[in-house]
Image (spheres, rainbow, N blue to C red):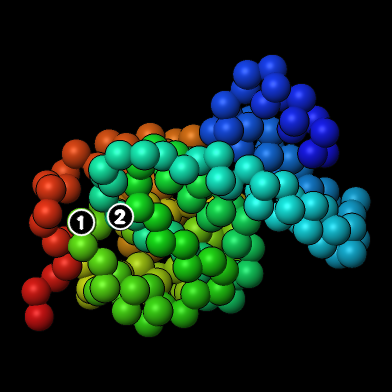
Amino acid sequence: MWRQIEDLLTAGTEPEPLYLRVLTPAMEAIGEAWAAGELDVGAEHRATAVMVRVIGRLGPLFVARGRKRGTILLGVAAGDRHSLPVTLLADPLRGRRFEVVDLGGDVPALSFGASVKALDRLVAVGVCATTARPKAVRGAIAAVREATAAPVVLGGAAIRDQGYGLRLGADYVSPSASEALDIFESLSSNVPSGRSSRVSS
Protein backbone atom coordinates (compact mmCIF):
# COMPACT_ATOMS: atom_id res chain seq x y z
CA MET A 1 0.00 0.00 0.00
CA TRP A 2 2.81 2.42 0.82
CA ARG A 3 4.22 2.09 -2.71
CA GLN A 4 0.86 3.23 -4.11
CA ILE A 5 0.84 6.16 -1.68
CA GLU A 6 4.38 7.13 -2.73
CA ASP A 7 3.37 7.02 -6.39
CA LEU A 8 0.43 9.34 -5.71
CA LEU A 9 2.62 11.77 -3.75
CA THR A 10 5.22 11.76 -6.51
CA ALA A 11 2.47 12.51 -9.03
CA GLY A 12 1.56 15.62 -7.04
CA THR A 13 -1.36 14.44 -4.92
CA GLU A 14 -1.60 16.46 -1.71
CA PRO A 15 -1.78 14.65 1.67
CA GLU A 16 -5.33 15.77 2.49
CA PRO A 17 -6.92 14.27 -0.65
CA LEU A 18 -5.00 11.08 0.06
CA TYR A 19 -6.69 10.86 3.44
CA LEU A 20 -10.15 11.74 2.15
CA ARG A 21 -10.19 9.87 -1.17
CA VAL A 22 -7.90 6.90 -0.56
CA LEU A 23 -7.35 6.04 3.11
CA THR A 24 -10.81 6.87 4.47
CA PRO A 25 -12.71 4.92 1.76
CA ALA A 26 -10.28 2.01 2.25
CA MET A 27 -11.03 1.87 5.97
CA GLU A 28 -14.76 2.14 5.32
CA ALA A 29 -14.58 -0.77 2.90
CA ILE A 30 -12.71 -2.86 5.46
CA GLY A 31 -15.30 -2.05 8.11
CA GLU A 32 -18.17 -2.93 5.80
CA ALA A 33 -16.53 -6.22 4.82
CA TRP A 34 -16.05 -7.14 8.47
CA ALA A 35 -19.66 -6.24 9.30
CA ALA A 36 -20.85 -8.41 6.39
CA GLY A 37 -18.80 -11.36 7.59
CA GLU A 38 -16.47 -11.23 4.60
CA LEU A 39 -13.43 -10.52 6.82
CA ASP A 40 -12.61 -12.17 10.11
CA VAL A 41 -11.35 -10.16 13.09
CA GLY A 42 -7.73 -11.11 12.42
CA ALA A 43 -7.82 -9.81 8.86
CA GLU A 44 -9.55 -6.62 10.01
CA HIS A 45 -6.88 -6.06 12.65
CA ARG A 46 -4.06 -6.64 10.16
CA ALA A 47 -5.58 -4.13 7.77
CA THR A 48 -5.92 -1.62 10.58
CA ALA A 49 -2.28 -2.14 11.57
CA VAL A 50 -1.18 -1.42 8.00
CA MET A 51 -3.30 1.73 7.97
CA VAL A 52 -1.78 2.91 11.26
CA ARG A 53 1.73 2.54 9.81
CA VAL A 54 0.77 4.45 6.67
CA ILE A 55 -0.78 7.28 8.69
CA GLY A 56 2.32 7.42 10.88
CA ARG A 57 4.45 8.09 7.82
CA LEU A 58 2.06 10.63 6.28
CA GLY A 59 1.27 12.59 9.46
CA PRO A 60 4.42 14.78 9.39
CA LEU A 61 3.42 16.05 5.94
CA PHE A 62 0.54 17.97 7.53
CA VAL A 63 2.75 20.23 9.66
CA ALA A 64 1.72 23.79 8.77
CA ARG A 65 3.57 26.96 9.63
CA GLY A 66 1.90 30.11 10.86
CA ARG A 67 -0.41 31.17 13.65
CA LYS A 68 -2.88 28.55 14.79
CA ARG A 69 -6.53 29.28 14.00
CA GLY A 70 -7.90 27.85 17.24
CA THR A 71 -8.15 24.49 18.97
CA ILE A 72 -10.31 21.50 18.09
CA LEU A 73 -10.79 18.62 20.52
CA LEU A 74 -11.50 15.20 19.01
CA GLY A 75 -12.38 11.92 20.68
CA VAL A 76 -14.34 8.71 20.42
CA ALA A 77 -17.24 8.01 22.78
CA ALA A 78 -16.77 5.51 25.62
CA GLY A 79 -16.92 1.84 24.70
CA ASP A 80 -15.82 2.47 21.11
CA ARG A 81 -12.16 1.71 20.38
CA HIS A 82 -12.21 2.77 16.73
CA SER A 83 -9.73 5.65 16.88
CA LEU A 84 -8.64 5.67 13.22
CA PRO A 85 -11.55 7.83 11.99
CA VAL A 86 -10.46 10.54 14.43
CA THR A 87 -6.84 10.31 13.33
CA LEU A 88 -7.86 10.56 9.69
CA LEU A 89 -9.62 13.82 10.56
CA ALA A 90 -7.01 15.20 12.96
CA ASP A 91 -4.13 15.35 10.49
CA PRO A 92 -5.98 17.33 7.79
CA LEU A 93 -7.16 19.75 10.47
CA ARG A 94 -3.54 20.25 11.53
CA GLY A 95 -2.69 20.86 7.90
CA ARG A 96 -5.25 23.67 7.94
CA ARG A 97 -3.42 25.27 10.90
CA PHE A 98 -5.73 24.16 13.69
CA GLU A 99 -4.34 23.01 17.01
CA VAL A 100 -5.79 19.52 17.45
CA VAL A 101 -6.12 17.62 20.71
CA ASP A 102 -6.81 13.98 19.81
CA LEU A 103 -8.07 11.95 22.78
CA GLY A 104 -8.24 8.74 20.75
CA GLY A 105 -10.70 5.92 21.27
CA ASP A 106 -12.92 4.85 24.18
CA VAL A 107 -12.89 8.22 25.97
CA PRO A 108 -14.93 8.41 29.21
CA ALA A 109 -17.42 11.26 29.32
CA LEU A 110 -15.64 12.85 32.28
CA SER A 111 -12.41 12.93 30.29
CA PHE A 112 -14.12 14.87 27.52
CA GLY A 113 -15.22 17.47 30.07
CA ALA A 114 -11.89 17.67 31.87
CA SER A 115 -9.96 18.02 28.62
CA VAL A 116 -12.19 20.82 27.37
CA LYS A 117 -11.67 22.82 30.56
CA ALA A 118 -7.93 22.96 29.90
CA LEU A 119 -8.25 24.53 26.44
CA ASP A 120 -8.40 28.11 25.22
CA ARG A 121 -9.57 29.37 21.82
CA LEU A 122 -11.70 26.26 21.40
CA VAL A 123 -13.37 26.16 18.00
CA ALA A 124 -15.43 23.02 18.54
CA VAL A 125 -15.45 19.51 19.93
CA GLY A 126 -15.68 16.54 17.58
CA VAL A 127 -17.23 13.34 18.93
CA CYS A 128 -16.92 10.17 16.84
CA ALA A 129 -19.10 7.09 17.19
CA THR A 130 -18.38 4.06 15.03
CA THR A 131 -19.89 1.45 17.36
CA ALA A 132 -20.63 3.52 20.47
CA ARG A 133 -24.00 3.13 22.19
CA PRO A 134 -26.36 6.13 22.24
CA LYS A 135 -26.00 6.48 26.02
CA ALA A 136 -22.22 6.88 25.70
CA VAL A 137 -22.60 9.51 22.97
CA ARG A 138 -25.13 11.47 25.01
CA GLY A 139 -22.85 11.29 28.03
CA ALA A 140 -19.86 12.61 26.09
CA ILE A 141 -21.87 15.50 24.67
CA ALA A 142 -23.40 16.33 28.07
CA ALA A 143 -19.94 16.46 29.65
CA VAL A 144 -18.77 18.83 26.93
CA ARG A 145 -21.84 21.03 27.45
CA GLU A 146 -21.02 21.39 31.15
CA ALA A 147 -17.50 22.56 30.37
CA THR A 148 -17.81 24.84 27.33
CA ALA A 149 -20.14 26.80 25.12
CA ALA A 150 -18.26 25.58 22.04
CA PRO A 151 -20.35 23.57 19.54
CA VAL A 152 -20.25 19.79 19.27
CA VAL A 153 -19.78 18.12 15.89
CA LEU A 154 -20.87 14.47 15.81
CA GLY A 155 -20.05 11.87 13.20
CA GLY A 156 -19.24 8.22 12.63
CA ALA A 157 -20.82 5.05 11.29
CA ALA A 158 -23.11 4.70 14.32
CA ILE A 159 -24.82 8.02 13.54
CA ARG A 160 -27.61 7.04 11.19
CA ASP A 161 -28.67 10.48 10.02
CA GLN A 162 -28.71 14.15 10.95
CA GLY A 163 -31.93 13.96 12.95
CA TYR A 164 -30.60 11.09 15.05
CA GLY A 165 -27.36 12.96 15.76
CA LEU A 166 -29.20 16.11 16.76
CA ARG A 167 -31.43 14.12 19.12
CA LEU A 168 -28.28 12.81 20.81
CA GLY A 169 -27.40 16.43 21.57
CA ALA A 170 -25.01 17.48 18.82
CA ASP A 171 -25.03 20.94 17.26
CA TYR A 172 -23.77 19.64 13.91
CA VAL A 173 -23.80 16.19 12.34
CA SER A 174 -21.28 15.17 9.72
CA PRO A 175 -21.77 12.13 7.48
CA SER A 176 -18.19 12.23 6.20
CA ALA A 177 -14.70 13.48 7.01
CA SER A 178 -14.77 16.02 4.18
CA GLU A 179 -18.01 17.51 5.48
CA ALA A 180 -16.61 17.57 9.00
CA LEU A 181 -13.68 19.61 7.72
CA ASP A 182 -16.10 22.06 6.11
CA ILE A 183 -18.05 22.38 9.38
CA PHE A 184 -14.92 23.07 11.43
CA GLU A 185 -13.79 25.62 8.84
CA SER A 186 -17.12 27.45 9.10
CA LEU A 187 -16.93 27.49 12.90
CA SER A 188 -13.38 28.83 13.07
CA SER A 189 -14.51 32.36 12.28
CA ASN A 190 -16.51 32.42 15.54
CA VAL A 191 -13.44 32.26 17.78
CA PRO A 192 -11.86 35.72 18.25
CA SER A 193 -8.11 35.83 18.83
CA GLY A 194 -7.10 35.30 22.44
CA ARG A 195 -10.56 34.58 23.78
CA SER A 196 -11.28 31.52 25.87
CA SER A 197 -14.43 29.58 25.08
CA ARG A 198 -14.59 27.93 28.50
CA VAL A 199 -17.69 28.20 30.61
CA SER A 200 -17.18 30.46 33.62
CA SER A 201 -17.38 28.67 36.94
Q: Is residue 42 visible?
A: yes
Q: Is residue 176 visible?
A: no
- Which image quarter is the N terminus in? top right
Image side of residue 62 versus residue 11, left or right: left
Q: Earlier in the sequence, mark 2 or mark 1?
A: 2
Rendered position, 58 above or below 144: above
Disc 2: which residue: 71
Q: Name the residue: 69% across, 17% down.
A: 11
Rendered position, 146 above or below 70: below
Mark 2 vs 1: CB contact within 8 A? yes
Rendered position, 23 above or below 140: above
Between 125 and 163, the one lying in front of the other is: 125
Give the percent coordinates (x, y) of residue 173.
40, 47
Q: Residues within 10 Å of mark 2 (few under 14, many from 20)?
A: many
**Numbered label attached to residue 39:** none
Three-letter amino acid code at the position of disc 2: Thr
Give the percent coordinates (x, y) of residue 115.
34, 74
Q: Name the residue: 63% across, 43% down.
A: 58
Disc 1: which residue: 121
Give the percent coordinates (x, y) of residue 46.
85, 58
